[in-house]
Amino acid sequence: MRIPPISRRSRRVLICAMIGVLLIALPAMVLASDGEEAAYVSEFYGTFWSLAPPLLAIVLALITKEVYISLFVGIFMGGLLYANFNPVKATISIAQMYISRVGDSWNAGILIFLVILGVMVALMNAAGGSAAYGKWAAARMKSKEGATLSTVGLGVLIFVDDYFNCLTVGSVMQPVTDKFKVSRAKLAYIIDATAAPVCIIAPISSWAAAVTGSVTGDTIDGFKVFLRAIPYNYYALLTILFMVVITLLKFDYGPMKKAGRAAESGDLFNGQPDEYAGKEIPRNERGKVIDLMLPTLMLIVLCILGMVYTGGFFDGTPFVEAFADCDASAGLVIGSLAALIFTFIYYMLRRVITFKQFAACLPEGFRQMVPAILILTFAWTLSGFCRESLGAGDYVGAIVQNSAVASGILPAIFYLIACGVSFATGTSWGTFGILIPIAQSVFPGDLSQILVITIAACMAGAVFGDHCSPISDTTIMASAGARVNHIQHVSTQLPYAITVGLVSLICFVLAGFVGNWMISLGVGILLMTGTLFVLRAVTAKK
């Protein structure tokens, strides 16, 4: 992986940030040295400072475009806050947190899944399946809009899991979007926008299981809550509408427009290096479309079977219940490993790759995922400090529970809080896992309409923040799926996500007082479409 040199401006910003952290640390170091206990019990737990490390990392990443160093600065600050600015304890806590995040069974499964998918992509390229599919699709698609809508459609169809969505859609559609000069930044946005926003409204998905598990109470069915919340999940629904309408209107705005112009001139990466580029493995020119489609189809089927297997489906548990109780991380590893074995046998029987090429694809697939793995492990470490060591969830929960406002405006308030927490921590599951029980405590008793809307607001806000945050795992893997610079992906998709997020906020305000999803969603569709027409008119004048 070739890492571009850090610019002089970026170096100045990073040095100033480090000096600022140390200046804040000096007084606290003196105070913390008075007692042994102060070095091990954070005085910043459950305070505003619990959100400072991820916010610092996000701001630095957006300013300097150096995501690795920015994440490390955020981790360093998190360690100092946790250790009450004792430098020795901070160093030890950073090492322990990193090891615990990487060694976590769920996270380890995701890393293994990433590597296997990287190998699968390398195999598909070596067998010539990706190139054959690109030629086949390009012959049948006559426009950039057709290629874009096909990418959206595939992303919507792969609704089982967001991680699986990010990498599969990218590997399948890259040849098509490159043929029609769709920028990699636009491809990354489509991948990201059809990952979490689609999974959060799909009843059969790992996200449905996560939401169901967050709903507490013996008299409330979590799965029924999830189903009733779907028409109120405005951010997810309007994001899909946004992608379709902006494609049909044939325009972009903000940084995405600049990336689109660069792609039209042949620069798909908008001046950024291809961080995922490596040595080319010889490609078989006899590859066919089936050499891509069959392994991909088997990957989807076997991953679903792997997930329901972990939920006890083959032991007699009903399919829906097995999906709700599955271990998505372990299931994806089982399914992807089985798909890899099938692909190897199939390609060898087809004689489209040699054993030597297969062996070369193993390290190449891993190498292609190194940037995503590095960012993911840093992001997990930072998120661990924020959520576990510094108690960001407790801080937010105390604010919500102590507020006294009209019940009609509460869905919008929960939505805004979920947006902020998810953006700062980079986790949507952790966000609605914190806020949904709080929403239930605010509206105690049986399942009321206002509670369903508020739970939907928690889910929508969590997805919005997860969609925008540079330290979100799905955002990181969308960058990996499109093989585009991570910060470029974040900066180009941010105006699009904010546009949909603001319209969704208006919908939640309306829904809180009207309580009818048809009225509020209808207004949201009109507002979203009208906003895009206005933006097109404004950009056309410029």
Image (spheres, rainbow, N blue to C red):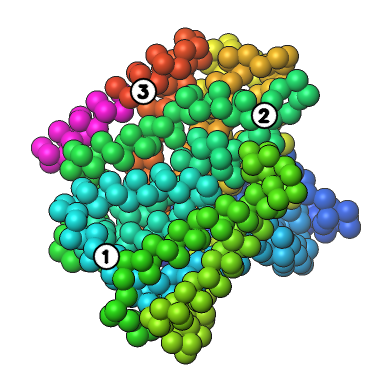
Location of residue 537 (image quadrant): top left
Residue occupying image coordinates x 58% and y 11%: 406
Q: Position of residue 342 (x, y in %)?
A: 53, 70
Choose the circle earlier in sequence order: 2 or 3: 2
Q: Is residue 22 above or below residue 249?
A: below
Rendered-image quadrant of the N terminus: bottom left
The number of numbered discs placed on residues in the rendered structure image is: 3
Q: Which mark is residue 222?
A: 2
The residue lying toward the viewer, choosing from 88 and 114, is 114
Choose the circle earlier in sequence order: 3 or 1: 1
Location of residue 497 (image quadrant): top left
Taking the magenta stretch, the answer to whether it contains residue 115 is no
Q: Which is closer to the viewer, label 2 or label 3?
A: 2
Magenta stretch bounds: 527-542
Residue occupying image coordinates x 59% and y 29%: 226
Q: Which is closer to the viewer, label 1 or label 2?
A: 1
Q: Which residue lies under the disc numbered 1?
A: 134
The residue lying toward the viewer, choosing from 448 and 295, is 295
Q: Is residue 51 above or below residue 372?
A: above
Q: Which residue lies under the disc numbered 3?
A: 524
Secondary element under disc 2, as helix, strand or loop, is helix
* Tag 3: amino acid: Gly
* Tag 1: amino acid: Gly
* Tag 2: amino acid: Gly
The residue lying toward the viewer, choosing from 165 and 190, is 165
Residue occupying image coordinates x 51% and y 50%: 162
Location of residue 108 (image quadrant): bottom right
